[in-house]
Amino acid sequence: MRTAKRFPPSRSSNASSFVKASDLSVAHQWRGRVVDLTDHRGPAGWRAAQALAREGAIVYLGDAAQHERACSFDQQARELGHEALVLQWASEPRGQIRSDACPPHAEKVTLSEDQEPSDNRAHTPGAVTLVGGGPGEPDLLTVAALKATLRADVILLDRLGVALNVMDLAPGALVLDVGKAPGRHKMSQERINDTMLAFAREGARVVRLKGGDVFIFGRGGEEWRFLAAHGIRVDIVPGITSALSVPAHAGVSATYRNVTRAVTIISGHQPFNNAELSALVALGGTIVILMGVATFPSTVAGLRAAGLPESTGVALLEQGYTAHERHTFTTLGAAIEDARSRNVTNPAIIVIGDVVNVRETSAELAETTPLAATE
């Protein structure tokens, strides 16, 4: 039985190191080291390259077209009709996975014999993780979401996915852009479902990275049901929903004691009928509308007709957590004209309720309190 050399392996030129799987994820030990993995094709070599790159190594795999795992996933994507695919190669500050000629001074790494069967997923069903990426701020990505992305073989990325460099988080992962914009669907939901299923059946660890939370108008429930019906294991990583976080970022508290005790989150994709608008007014509380810019004039007119006072506060919060974030604060009586004059566009979170007016007094207080300077 072979015994692994004591870790860490030698750093000398042309050195050969024999490593175990546990050695591949030891923090800081691989940063900046040039590693030759060209003798290791297939799943085990691919996973080892990902692990080493995450720890900061510069890993050479040889010709990527000859690498079985990269090649099989790439070919699978093309057969499914994906033209916008990107086979990601990691970049600094974490590390690199390179497909060009290996330099002579690279440190050759030989994987221990027990790694091949432990990571051979050719006949092992894969799994899909539905990940909520939060409102767009990388710091609001949860620890569980980060871990799932780090382990991914294939990532299906939404238009409203987090504003981060997926390449740095998942070196070697195949990233497919399947995002949808209002009226412009790059890919149907059926094709997205079929893509996740196909890769999972190939043994891939698939991450479906969505904006916000997977179950708040993210069609996560549909995807879960579809995959489960086909025998695929599905894991759920909840995310921070933009319905609450974007207003909070703008200083609007969705609930406020003695002001409101209810929050209704609704999709404005389709116009509301009179019965729905009357029910919203009767319930009271805060109304948060997602995907509601196009139907905003009819929504406001309907709420006014149903009896909601024109003095009710309205916040139009565009491009939350981006460099283009913009806030428009108005009232129900002036909201239609203000939205038109300001040319409010998607993506936007719309908040209607007295909590918007509370925000104004809170902002005035914040200007005079030392806590306002606290980050």
Image (cartoon, grey):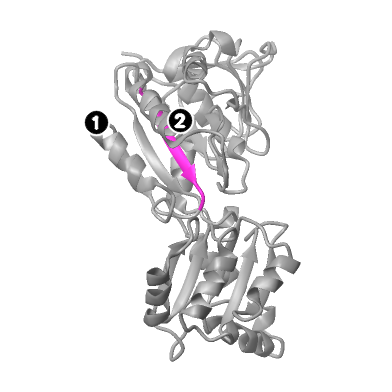
Residue at (38%, 40%) from the top-left corner? 129
- Decide: few, some or many residues near mark 1? Use Cα within 10 Å; few <14, some 14-19, many ≥20: few
User: Can residue 8 be seen in the rendering of this structure?
Assistant: no
User: Which image quarter holds the N terminus?
Assistant: top left
The answer to whether 135 is drawn above or below residue 191 in the figure is below
Which percent across, then down, holds residue 313? 58, 81
User: Can residue 188 be seen in the rendering of this structure?
Assistant: yes
Q: Main secondary structure of the magenta part?
A: strand
Mark nearer the N terminus (2 vs 1): 2
Q: Mark 2: which secondary structure?
A: helix
Residue 246 in the figure: left or right of residue 326: left
Residue 55 in the figure: left or right of residue 154: right
Which percent across, then down, holds residue 47? 46, 25
Residue 196 in the figure: left or right of residue 227: right
Find the magenta span and give its range: 203-211
Q: Nearer the viewer, mark 2 or mark 1?
A: 1
In this view, the residue in front, 103 or 3, is: 103
Residue at (69%, 79%) from the top-left corner? 373
Q: How many marks?
A: 2
Is the Cβ of the residue at disc 2 closer than 8 Å to that at disc 1? no
Q: Identify the image quadrant of residue 200.
A: top left
Residue at (58%, 39%) from the top-left corner? 166
Which residue bears the numbered disc 1?
231
User: Which image quarter holds the C terminus?
Assistant: bottom right
Residue flagged by tag 2: what amino acid is it? Asp
Which residue bears the numbered disc 2?
23
Q: Mark 1: which secondary structure?
A: loop
Residue flagged by tag 1: what amino acid is it? Gly
